[in-house]
Image (cartoon, grey):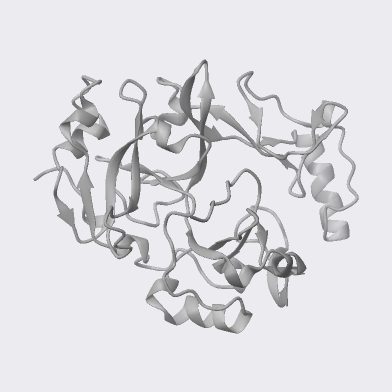
Amino acid sequence: MRRLGSVQQKVSCVFMTEVKEEPSKKRDCQPFHMVATTILNPDVLEADINSALATEKLDGTCCYVTHYKGKLHLWARLDRKANKQAEKRFKKYQYAHRSSKGFTWNVEEDFKTVPDTWIPAHRVKHQNGHPVPDEHGHIPGWVPVEDGNKQYCWHSSAVDYGAGTVLLLRPAANNDYDTLEIAAVPLTDLQEQTLELIGTNINGNPYGLGCKKQPIHLLVSHGSVRIQNPPRVNFEQLYSWFCSSPEGLVEGIVWHCGDGSLFKVHRHHLGLEWPAGNTHLGSKPVVVRVGGTAVAAGDNSKSLFASLSHLNGHCFSGLRDIHFDL
């Protein structure tokens, strides 16, 4: 079985990119943005992109499963960012050079403080004992999701440390990639994996999960939602696929190469809008498989685990149709 890459840092675009003199749709106050050219990134040929596994790029927030205080925990993504003065200096340099290459950071003084529990992501470069920022001026990292932390309450709703489980959205157990299932999965099954948290209060909820009164947040293992008939890695074919294929109603594609490297393309790279109406992921039938034993370790009858356990065995036509008032 192919080993899927772990999303610990920013993933490179499958194409070479260039600056377009228009305001960025992704980053506020940035008067330019990056778009894909038709030229392949040279690194993808070395990684044998044509044999890579194509998977759906999900629109959520990145998470990680590893140990904390001797037990497996869910960790939330927290990039260490520059303080206001350093950020202003960095933006000015970017605007003048249309690139961040050559910019010099004072890592000890330029960055905001982070919690003592913060750890840098894997493969972050270090210099003089300090982690070095990436081309976006961020130092990727993680903080543990602890019970009672309001900042990460939506993360907490998808994990039960008492039972040692998380709520995972994945292709159905019979490998039917046209059907999804929601299951309570042991944290031990996900050790050292990265996942995406999606749901009601994440990035505008493009998949239509839950509502304000009944929020739903679920984890999805990176690389688990495979694209069945991906287009070739060619600009025109990808553009056409995003525009006309039902499978193309996704934020983007992430390719998992045999050597563990990752490459991506998202709709913004191609000048296409996102969200794009009824998403491909949101339109798949989904069955709930969260049995009573999944919530046995907890006594909170109002938890998301308990609510989903009442729907155990129910099948819905799409993620938008999941509701608890049956």
Task: Using residue 174 as the reference point, say whether residue 227 is left or right of it.
Answer: right
Which residue is outermost to the left?
A: 326
Q: Quadrant of the C terminus?
A: top left
Q: Position of residue 325 (x, y in %)?
A: 11, 43
Answer with the quarter of the image where residue 141 lies.
top right
Q: Nearer the viewer, residue 323 or 160?
A: 160
Q: Position of residue 310 (x, y in %)?
A: 13, 38
At horizontal 56% and vertical 83% (from top left) the residue drawn is 237
At horizontal 73% and vertical 66% (from top left) the residue drawn is 46
Q: Nearer the viewer, residue 197 or 48?
A: 48
At horizontal 43% and vertical 82% (from top left) the residue drawn is 244
Q: What count of labels does the image hold? A: 0
Task: Using residue 229 as the reference point, say whether residue 307 is left or right of it.
Answer: left
At horizontal 88% and vertical 47% (from top left) the residue drawn is 103
Which residue is outermost to the front?
A: 1
Q: Is residue 18 visible?
A: no
Q: Position of residue 255 (x, y in %)?
A: 57, 62
Q: Is residue 263 above or below residue 273?
A: above
Answer with the quarter of the image where residue 129 lies.
top right
Q: Position of residue 267 (x, y in %)?
A: 55, 68
Task: Using residue 74 as the reference point, say whether residue 311 is left or right of it.
Answer: left
Q: Is residue 217 above or below residue 97?
A: above
Task: Using residue 290 as the reference point, say whether residue 111 is left or right of it.
Answer: right
Q: Is residue 238 above or below residue 293?
A: below
Q: Is residue 107 visible?
A: yes
